[in-house]
Amino acid sequence: MMGIPQLTAQQIAQLSGFVSQYITAKRDKFLGQCVPLTQEQRTAMDGFFSPHLLDGVRVVNLNPLRVSNPSFYSMLAEMGFRNLPDFSQMAAITFSDVVVSHVPFTNGLLFHELVHVEQYRQLRIPRFSELYVQGFLIGGGYNSIPLEVHAYALGARFEANPRQRFSVADEVANWIRRCRY
Ligand SMILES: [Zn+2]
């Protein structure tokens, strides 16, 4: 595949470890600047996510600052990677229970990121990182990472009918059980 070098199992494990460390470091870095959801956001998300998740999640709008890409990106570029996800250009990024946005939150954007919070909650950071890396390598890019595909699909379902509640926790558990990530 163009721009995606073949990696050994050992290299994949190492890369997953780097991603896991990056996520943990960013989560800790931004936590202090974060705030809980507003009552309005909370009301819009109620019924889709557990009260526990909605109470615990923290958000920050960084604008005009940007999240920096991982320092190991330069190493990956040298290895021949060409289409790495550019975090600095994304609308928002979720680091476990901390959502960092570059733009004002719409409910659709927030929903997508909260799906990731639920994925992290069930998988924990190391396994989420491993599946994210594997999904990228197997699918050949950001758009085919199953963790993203699922978040976009559930987000589209929410946006099509924001009052039709469904349990994101059940949807995520179902994908884990069926090894779809
Ligand atoms: Zn996403």
Image (spheres, grey):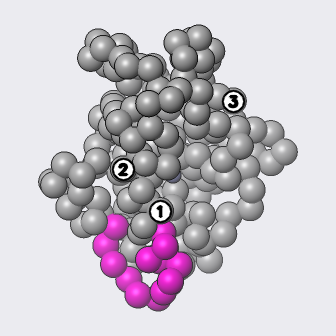
Q: Is residue 172 above or below residue 168?
A: above
Q: Nearer the viewer, mark 3 or mark 2?
A: 2
Tell me the SS state at disc 1. Answer: helix
Q: Residue furthest left?
A: 177
C-alpha separation, residue under disc 1 versus residue under disc 2: 10 Å
Q: Please, what is the three-letter code of the amino acid marked with disc 2?
A: Pro
Q: Is residue 168 left or right of residue 77?
A: left
Q: Quadrant of residue 74?
A: top right
Which residue is drawn at the image coordinates 53% and 78% (left, top)?
159
Q: Nearer the viewer, residue 74 or 128?
A: 74
C-alpha separation, residue under disc 3 versus residue under disc 1: 23 Å
Q: Is residue 180 above or below residue 159?
A: above
Does the stretch in magenta take in 165?
A: yes
Q: Please, what is the three-letter code of the amino acid marked with disc 3?
A: Ser
Tell me the SS state at disc 2. Answer: helix
The quarter of the rendered structure image containing the N terminus is top left
Q: Are marks 3 and 1 in contact (CB under 8 Å)?
A: no
The residue beneath circle 2 is 146
- Of the numbered discs in the image, which one, if any, rests on residue 152? 1
The earlier-in-sequence mark between 3 and 2 is: 3
The residue beneath circle 3 is 68
Whether residue 102 is visible, yes or no, is yes
User: Dot 1, crowdedness within 10 Å: few (<14), some or many (≥20)?
Assistant: some
Report the span colored magenta. 155-168
Q: Is residue 49 above or below residue 47?
A: above
Which residue is drawn at the image coordinates 49% and 49% (left, top)?
143
Q: Please, what is the three-letter code of the amino acid marked with disc 1?
A: Tyr
Whether residue 116 is visible, yes or no, is no
